[in-house]
Amino acid sequence: MNLKYKRVLLKLSGEALMGDLGYGIDPNVVRSVARQVLSLVQNDVEVSIVLGGGNIWRGLRASSQGMDRAVADYMGMLATVLNSLALQDALEKMECPTRVMTAISMPEVAEPYIRRRAIRHMEKDLVVILAAGTGNPYFSTDTAAALRALELGAEVILFAKNKVDGVYSSDPFVDSDAVKFEELSYTDAIRMGVKVVDGPALALCQENNLPIIVFNMQQEGNIQRAVAGEKVGTLVT
């Protein structure tokens, strides 16, 4: 397989893991992701992964209903740990070694996140799953993905979505005239206020010239296609 990128960060939304379920984790989706990640590792790609937790808990929604925002966000971080352990289990059942590293200390289930250790794991062909966001409330997992990608020297962030297959001029589920972009500048994405990636993450990537690919992961093989540099979804650069 001829691949364009050799070190990538894959950002999976929590909703992507639930597939067509209304809640929780769809084992078939997790196995599909694991197969595609394993294929990357077998082709000498170094992979780190950040997962959202929206399939289990959405902190912003709870906050809007009266819960303290910090408490709601910490609960969301714990939801990402559940998703990370599920993906780790699927990968290791395929004999793909992994490490879950968390921004919140929980040594019984995962290693603490240490940048140099994470890089060394990837250099040894281990998949590094980065859980619990940044470890701080008020920061989304999109922003955590951008931060970790920069820390670990990733060449691209792959934003794998559940239903959206790229960035559109408006909400494609509401506006039938919405136009999908194959390529978009950071400036235009921020000006448009795109919803598929949050603003602080876009700004961080823009400042550091880190490209983003937004695509639909429901079609198996799209992760490999994105890493190969094929036209999948929308490239923000």
Image (cartoon, helix red, strand yellow):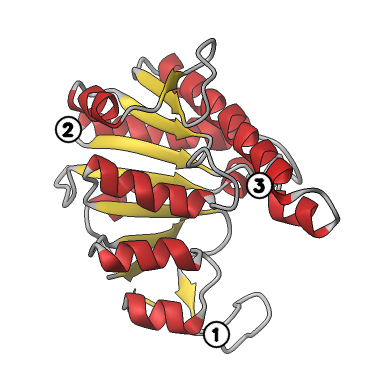
Which amino acid, mark 2?
Asp
Query: Can residue 159 be seen in this snapshot?
Result: yes
**Farthest-out residue, top:** 108
Query: Can residue 233 be seen in this snapshot?
Result: no
Q: Earlier in the sequence, mark 3 or mark 1?
A: 3
Secondary-structure class at tag 1: loop
Q: Are marks 3 and 1 in contact (CB under 8 Å)?
A: no
Q: Residue at x 56, y 82 (%)?
A: 170
Residue 208 locus on image (x, y percent): 24, 62
- Quickly name the residue at label 3: 54
- Quickly name the residue at label 1: 178
Q: In the image, is 92 to the left or to the right of 79?
A: left
Q: Residue at x 45, y 37 (%)?
A: 33
Secondary-structure class at tag 2: loop
Q: Earlier in the sequence, mark 3 or mark 2?
A: 2
Question: Which dot marks residue 44?
Answer: 2
Which amino acid, mark 3?
Gly
* Mark 3–mark 2 distance (CA, rounded to whole Å): 31 Å
Give whichever of 118, 212 is nearer the camera: 118
Give whichever of 15, 94 is nearer the camera: 15
Q: In the image, is 103 to the left or to the right of 157?
A: right
Residue 138 locus on image (x, y percent): 59, 53
Which amino acid, mark 1?
Ala
